[in-house]
Amino acid sequence: MADPQPIVRHALPAAHWPTADAAARSRLFSPVQLGPVRASSRTWVPAMVPWRASDDGFVTPDVLDWYGRFADGRPGVLVVEATGIRDVPSGPLLRASHDRFVPGLRDLVARVRERSGGETRLLLQILDFLAIRRRPEKAKFFARFLSITRRHHDAVRERFGAAAAGDEAGVRARLATCDDDALRTILTPREFRDYAFGFREEVNDLHLPHIRDLPRVLPGLFADAAARARQAGFDGVELHFAHAYTMASFLSRTNVRDDGYGGSATGRRRLPLEVFAAVRARVGDDWCVGTRYLGDEVIAGGSRLDDAIEHGVAFARAGFDFLSISKGGKFDDARQPHVGEAAYPYTGPSGHECMPTVRSDERGPFGRNVPLAAAIRAAVRQAGCTTPIVTAGGICDFAQAEAILQRGDADLVAAARQSLADPDWWRKMRLGRGGEVRRCIFTNYCEGLDQRHKQVTCQLWDRDFAAPDAATVPRSSDGKRRLLPPPWQP
């Protein structure tokens, strides 16, 4: 195994801001077509989960304030957070799983239309996710969660003697006394993972009827959610085929299902293409349907860029209206959670690649993942398709974004953390006032809040002590943080 690369703390790149005239002549602020939808610029705010929905999935005033604030910056495209397609409890995450959610989503659309002056195109990101449980206490795992087999009896007999393996209760008790080194030899890799990290469903669990039936169920659920998004007034949907969620797992090389929906690249793409076809049939050709998927999973045995290129060409040929490229963010290499907590997919190497910080290897975090989008775009163009490609990852400067577009590495530039730090930064650049941009420092303070399911904010917001709304701005539930960035007057 190669030695790990040394960690380098990188400084923010020097900022290069345009004059208003240069911005008007730039590619970044030129229009682009996303299938039937025309965006006024190539600026893109990707989906971020702010933990502001109600516990039963409804739009709240805080949700409206959050998206209204991003709309103030008038990005070309704003993608609303990952929104569930199943009508099941999922905490303070938005849902589009029933008609009762449509009125709130309609209010959200209206707020963005108003605050952006009708300029920003609005997409709803829709997703499915499988069950994951918190890491159990050791005694509880062996008392309740482990299915005891003959192999466990034999291991206990060999280690503790025949009397210890007399009944299931005795086997459970003995296993609970073993240290982790011993348990790694006694348990299967999956059993040890359930013990050490918490139970997590996989698309390969064909012994579970609801997992086996995913190809039958998911196309209709995605289509229903997309239809509700259209009813609410959105300009389109982004099908979430990335990171640690169900559809990304179908696309992954780790998907070895033997039912025609795994194994080969064609089999792994089958359900994603069926989901797209169902959505397109439901919403029609005059509404935007694209996807966010991974250019590289960055996990052992996972999909790499070659796979992503093949998927991207297939998606483009199928008629997707855009391809938004991300990287990593998988459960497979996540850091072990504490007892009572669930694994979080952005804590391991693949998570760093998804959201690289200023503490990185020699390549640094800025524009780190652009080559993935560039390679996919080149292959899509070679296949004769003009599908727009969206890139992201450590983009925080006008010259950087403009160079990406001028080189043809991508067609649109997405910035999550920089947009969180300053939702007005797009508009400031466009007006020639880039010197007023509040620049993200890429420490992932925001990601740390997300990991703990706290309302996501930016540490920079609270440093503006002279903000005119300091006395009235809504505060986080603990009262310590602003829920909105300071206002800006153009």
Image (cartoon, grey):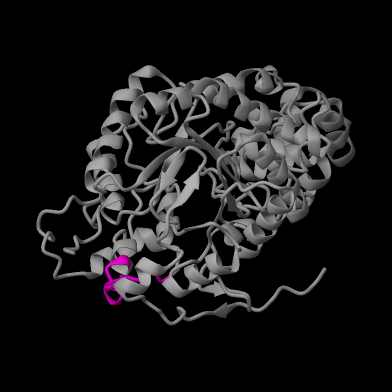
Residue 99: horizontal and vertical position, in percent? 37, 18
Closest to the observer: 362 or 219?
A: 219
Residue 305: horizontal and vertical position, in percent? 73, 55
Closest to the observer: 298 or 227?
A: 227
Answer with the quarter of the image where residue 410 lies: bottom right
Residue 210 in view here:
yes
Q: Using residue 229 as the reference point, say whether residue 171 is left or right of it.
A: right
Residue 190: horizontal and vertical position, in percent? 75, 38
Q: Using residue 455 as the reference point, say whether residue 470 is left or right of it.
A: left
Residue at 30% x, 36% y is: 109
Question: Secondary structure of the magenta portion, mostly?
Answer: loop
Give the magenta part as a residue range: 430-441
Residue at 26% x, 32% y is: 107
The quadrant in which the N terminus is found is: bottom right
Residue at 28% x, 73% y is: 432
Above/below status of 341 relative to 232: below
Q: Using residue 30 as the reference point, say whether residue 110 is left or right of it.
A: left
Closest to the observer: 120 or 134?
A: 120
Q: Using residue 74 as the reference point, say whether residue 324 is left or right of it.
A: right
Above/below status of 26 relative to 112: below
Above/below status of 103 relative to 14: above
Above/below status of 396 relative to 261: below
